Image (cartoon, helix red, strand yellow):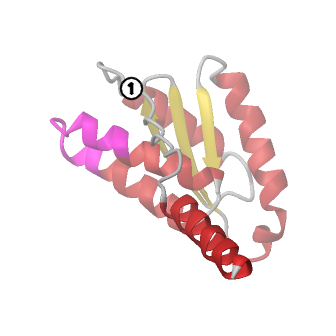
Amino acid sequence: MKRIEWSVLIILILVTVGCTPGAQKKPSSPPAEPTNYTFKQDQVDHAKKVAEKNKRVEEATVVHMNDELFVGLKVTNFDRFFLNSTRRDVNDHLRKEFPQYQLHITTDSKLVDEIKKVEEEIRKNPLFDKKKVYQKLTKIEQDMKQ
């Protein structure tokens, strides 16, 4: 009889402990969005020329926002075997030309296409939604880190 009572007591304790909510984690807040956005097209054109000087880069896509440059490099065929050295080389050249900017360089074709879409949106519409573009670039930056 004592054994059954102890078994029931232990089961009740396990059920109550298992069913109570634990400490809930607060969702991490996204980085604070800047209140003013700056886009410099002349910087973009110059950065594109610098990136395309690399013999392995077929096409470069650049978007400038505040103090950041997002660079997408289109590299095809045999040159894809040298992606790391290509990124490093372009990064070194851009760092010399634009030491004040934070550089985000990718050779991922999907991310290059996304950067290209953002660049075209900025070129086509001078009154583009800057907050929306900032969010797209933030998403691209997160995807680069994965």
The C terminus appears in which quarter of the rendering? bottom right
Q: Is residue 105 rendered to the left or right of residue 42?
A: right
Which of 35 and 64 lies nearest the eye of the viewer? 35
Residue 114 appears left or right of 106: left
- Asked if the stretch drawn in magenta spans residue 128, the answer is yes
User: Seen in the image, is 111 located left or right of residue 10?
Assistant: left
- Horizontally, residue 38 falls left or right of residue 114, namely left
User: The disc labelled 1 sits on which kind of residue?
Assistant: Lys
- Where does residue 66 sit, x and y in percent of width and height? 43, 23
Q: Which portion, as a residue range, is magenta?
A: 121-135
Direction front: furthest residue:
1
Element type where label 1 sits in the image: loop
5 lies above or below 106: below
Rendered position, 121 above or below 33? below
For mark 1, does the 10 Å Cα neighbourhood hold few (<14), some (14 to 19), or many (20 or more) residues?
few
Q: Please name the residue shown 30% across and 19% down the image.
A: 36
Residue 60 shows in this picture = no
Magenta-drawn stretch, dominant element (helix, strand or loop): helix
Vertical placement of residue 122 versus 115, above or below: above
Q: Position of residue 107 (x, y in %)?
A: 65, 59
Residue 58 in view, yes or no? yes
Examine the structure image and report whether residue 67 is included in the region drawn in magenta. no
x then y, percent, for residue 13? 59, 63
* Residue 119: percent from left, percent from top: 37, 48
**Location of residue 126 by image quarter:** top left
Q: Residue at x 15, y 35 (%)?
A: 127
Q: Which residue is mark 1?
A: 40
Residue depicted at 84% across the width and 52% down the height: 85
Q: Residue at x 68, y 77 (%)?
A: 7
